[in-house]
Amino acid sequence: MRTSIRKWPFTAFLFLLLLHQGALFSQINISAGQTAAALAKKLAGQGVVVTNPVLHCSNWANGFFNVVNSNLGLDSGIVLTTGRAASSPGFYGVNGYSSGLASFDNGTPGDSTLTSLAGQRTLDACTLEFDVMPAGDTISIDYVFSSEEYMSAVCGPYNDAFAFFISGPGITGSKNMALVPGTNIPVTINSINNGIPGSTGNIINCTSMGTGSPFTSYYNDNSNGNTLTHKGLTTILKAIYPVTPCGNYHLKIAIADAGNAKYDSGVFLEAGSLQSEHYSVNALRLPVGDTSAPICVKGCLPGRFHIKRTKNSSLPQTIKFVTAGTAAYGIDFAPIADSIIIPAFTNYADVVIYGIPTARNGVKELKLFLLSPNNCGAISSIIDSASMLIYDTIAIALTPADTAICGADTVRLKVSGDDIYSYNWLPDVNISGSALKQPSVYPQATTTYTVTAWLPGTSCPFRTAVSTLNVKLTPHIALVSDTVVCGHSSFYLNPVMQFANSNYSYAWIGPDGYASALQQPFFSNVIGSDRGIYRLKVTNDTNGCSSTAAVNLVVTVVDTPSVTSPAIICQNTGPSALFALGDNLTWYDRSGALLGANTPVIPTDTLAAYTYYVSSRIDNCESGKVELIAEVKKCCDGTIYIPNAFTPNGDGRNDKFRPVTDYGYFVKTMGVYNRWGQVVYSGNMGSWDGNFGTNPADADTYFYRIIFGCILGGTVERAGDVILIR
């Protein structure tokens, strides 16, 4: 036997964790602690009058609910529970998800009628009861039952009690309306579930509820839900019971824990779903033109208000209504009766609205308010409403009217007509869209445009309108988008004119403030700064029409090759090819004759000097020519002169100690030492500036050792002394 438990506040850490989880997961907003009158008013819908509400329930256990996002199926209403309706720190309500259990002992008593129904002691009861007068022959309410008993306690001995008791005329005692659809089996954990007994359950406890039990098709598993704490819930069910119209009935909605207070259950009841006979009206929506709104068009398309009752009856029913809105009775629409009869064995009838043709006075709205057919002696009240739009008889006008334009102009053709029409334009050329209400057109020659308007799917007559656009003679320019020229060349900006004549004037603008009024401006020496966009405007001076075009001038400037001249070549080293750095080199001899792309090769058997010219080329553009002189000389065959003194005083003469050699020698290493053997200079620069580190060396005698290399190979060493004079 289960024992009753009471949950106490958790540690501060778990308190904060639960607050975080509630904010993160709860998507059912609940306002707990409502009054009996507020709860009953929230439930009351069409065809019922509710009086004398009484509530026996903990403030924590009841409330309004509003769904933001959930698998509950209902969007709003009231909730009654055996625990808490809303989550709170340290406790779980029905609207917060956690790995913990929704199990809270309110410490309130059970209910005797539920105890009798459950066959065992009940606790934590929550009941709402009231008197109700139905206008029709049935009374019904929509609800969802949920419980923490699901999963572990399915088919167990404990079956939380839940019922909708009704009593009154024609009913002996009280009856439970909360039944499995099509049966007399009450809705409980054991009658609606997933068919799998829990850890303490036995399938016999479920099958013994009645034929077909357990009913799995009405069950939703919520074990992984994140908006509702209870581990299981039913689908949306309807509790319904036959009644005598205008009779006085008593309804009691009750739920309680059975056996003990462990594991909570709840019932969600949809707002406004407590109803008797139900009537509704809507304006039929016709898929016409660009709208699916309910409409009526004067003179051709009637509108319809569709009045419906929830079920067929063997008796006809007269339904009264009133109209309102901006549409004038007898002016915008034909007179209609103030009621309509729904025939026997039918559940609907239509009120047909015929629009009266009038001068165009804009779209009007017609509203129809449905009055309750049976309020049990009370004054008739509005139970539903619908509206439709009444449009003028199809008529259109087109602007601009016939007009003259330039050939380069774009014109917006505008139709004054309702948006529900469909449109078609002819001819279907030089137009932004042949089905648009206001297309843009750009005719190249005089054109008459015709628009046709009609209302698809109706017998409404079509309408047409025309506009002729007379196109004046307009210059037509053709320019190459990119014009590529070589740097330092000459060329013409040369537009191609269609229908050119002497009445045209020209205006060019370009980079760096360039401007010209010539038809074909001439450039004698194009340079890099001339590149860019050149725009041309040509105007027909007789009518003011003009056209524009643009050309991108691309100037290819080719840099001259980089050479070292003169190029010294050692005698008897074998044929040597000249070197130049550039793109697609082209060589010329001394006289300027073209040699081609092959690099000239210099013979080295005799001493001589040779002169060549070289250029670079990119595509068809060539740079200027650069002179390159090649000299064949003797290498490493002369003297080496080393001075014996120098004066680093900055007068520009003999400021550095530097050896002088014939061609072919180079300094590989040079060391300079003072009289104590200290190194005052070491390197391969071939000169000493007279400093010891960053300070001037003293005037004195210094010793050197220099190793010379020869470009032909081998080395020569020299050693001696030099005097530094200051």
Image: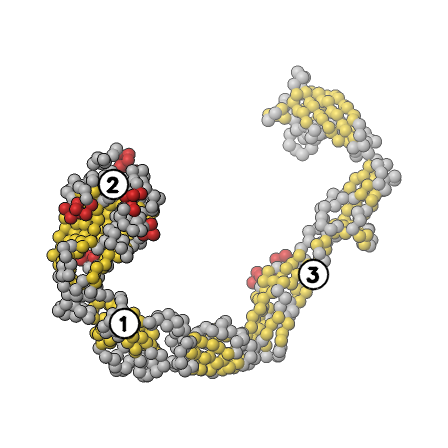
Report how far apart the C-alphas of labels 1 and 2 lie in the structure: 47 Å
Looking at the image, can residue 409 be seen? no
User: Up-down: is 128 above or below 13?
Assistant: below
Residue type for callout 3: Ser
Between residues 30 and 664, which one lies in front from this camera angle? 30
Report how far apart the C-alphas of labels 3 and 2 lie in the structure: 105 Å
Of the numbered discs 1 and 2, the one sitting upstream in the chain is 2
Q: How is the image coloured?
A: secondary structure
What is the residue that sits farthest to the right in this orientation?
605
Query: In the picture provided, is 656 more to the left or to the right than 257?
Result: right
Report how far apart the C-alphas of labels 1 and 3 lie in the structure: 98 Å
Contact check, label 1 and label 3, Cβ < 8 Å: no
Between residues 129 and 569, which one lies in front from this camera angle? 129
Closer to viewer: mark 1 or mark 3:
1
Of the numbered discs 3 and 2, the one sitting upstream in the chain is 2
Residue type for callout 1: Phe
Residue at horizontal 70 percent and vertical 29 percent from the top = 684
What is the quadrant of the C terminus in the image? top right
> Mark 1 falls on what kind of element?
loop
Residue type for callout 2: Pro
User: Up-down: is 526 above or below 257?
Assistant: below
Contact check, label 1 and label 2, Cβ < 8 Å: no
Looking at the image, can residue 157 be seen? yes
What is the residue that sits farthest to the left in this orientation?
52
Residue position for label 3: 489
Residue position for label 2: 157
Residue at horizontal 82 percent and vertical 44 percent from the top = 601
Which label is found at residue 345?
1
> Mark 2 falls on what kind of element?
loop
x%, y% of residue 334? 28, 82
